[in-house]
Image (cartoon, rainbow, N blue to C red):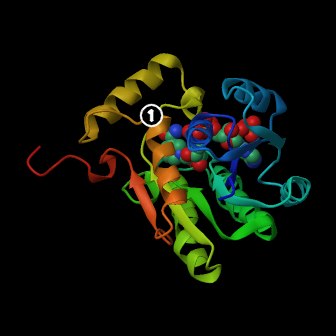
Amino acid sequence: MSIPHTVIVGGSSGVGLATARTLLYADHDVTIAGRSRERLDAASRELGGRARAIVLDAADPASAKSAFAALGAFDHLVLALGSAKGVGPFASVDLAEVRRGFEEKVFAHFATAQAALPFLAEDGSMTFVAAVTAHAAMPAGIGAANAAVAALAPILAAELKPLRVNGVSPGVIDTPWWDVLADEVKESAFADYAAMAPVGRIGRADDIAETIAFLIANSFMTGAVIVCDGGLRLGPGVGQ
Ligand SMILES: NC(=O)c1ccc[n+]([C@@H]2O[C@H](COP(=O)([O-])OP(=O)(O)OC[C@H]3O[C@@H](n4cnc5c(N)ncnc54)[C@H](OP(=O)(O)O)[C@@H]3O)[C@@H](O)[C@H]2O)c1
């Protein structure tokens, strides 16, 4: 059996980097992609030099097309890049930020999946990383963008068969995504989210990496979006 080759866009940090580590352990060939050569080099060192690294801007279709053309055929695509834009109450959220959030997440996932298609094995897979905001009473701007990404999984699973297409919607995960917040603000937010989640903790990047690895490995999974959030979407139970 040949060794599967998986490309992880957003593989230089957080969920994508943990997925690279998990898949290398499962004997995949792994290519990580991101915009910053510096971050890719640091991630490659962390992975012990066992992954290839390519510069690619998912929001720029020309960049994605030429990166995939240079790379050639591969088996599985993971889209683990996102945006933090579009947070705030519906009545006052800045529409320009909501639009940028859609460009940085929905358009970037859509365009990169399209650019990868000619190079993906017919019996391979795509996995989109959306977010729990798509499935819960959470900020509307970022929630609508993640809902659009999650919607792609069943639509593309039907259209692109036998390619399998799935998604995962993480809850709050301790990754550099949160580094925009000052340390003490971040720690207090994490403590609040941990208290809200039935499992009593926030997530680790490995929690999501294991879910992505499962979706790639299980040939009966397609058109599914797994919410991996420690139950955060459920809110407090009745009577609490
Ligand atoms: N962390 C959470 O709590 C959480 C919760 C729910 C959903 N998510 C979702 O999980 C996914 C991964 O997030 P994370 O927490 O792992 O974030 P992260 O640690 O900030 O990593 C983001 C990765 O995406 C890359 N990236 C960003 N924009 C890109 C672009 N236009 N083209 C190519 N690469 C790009 C980044 O590298 P460069 O900047 O160098 O390009 C980096 O490798 C995102 O879709 C996020 O929305 C995260």
Residue at 32% from the left image edge and 32% from the top image edge: 201
Residue at the (12%, 52%) spot, across then down: 238
- Residue at 55% of width from left, 58% of height from top? 216
117 up-or-down from 169: above or below: below
- What amino acid type should be assigned to the residue bearing mark 1? Arg
In this orientation, which residue lies closer to the viewer: 32 or 113? 32
Where residue 165 appears, as percent x and y from the top left, is 57, 68
| Any part of residue 91 in sight | no
Q: How many marks?
A: 1
Q: Quadrant of the C terminus?
A: top left
Decide if residue 220 is on the left or right side of residue 156.
left
- Image location (x, y in percent) of residue 70: 91, 54
Q: Quadrant of residue 37?
A: top right
Helix, strand or loop status at disc 1: loop
Quadrant of the drawing holding the N terminus? bottom right
Outermost residue, left direction? Answer: 239
What is the residue that sits farthest to the top in this orientation? 184
Q: Can you tell me which quadrant of the image ligand 1 is in?
A: top right
**What residue did someone put label 1 on?**
204
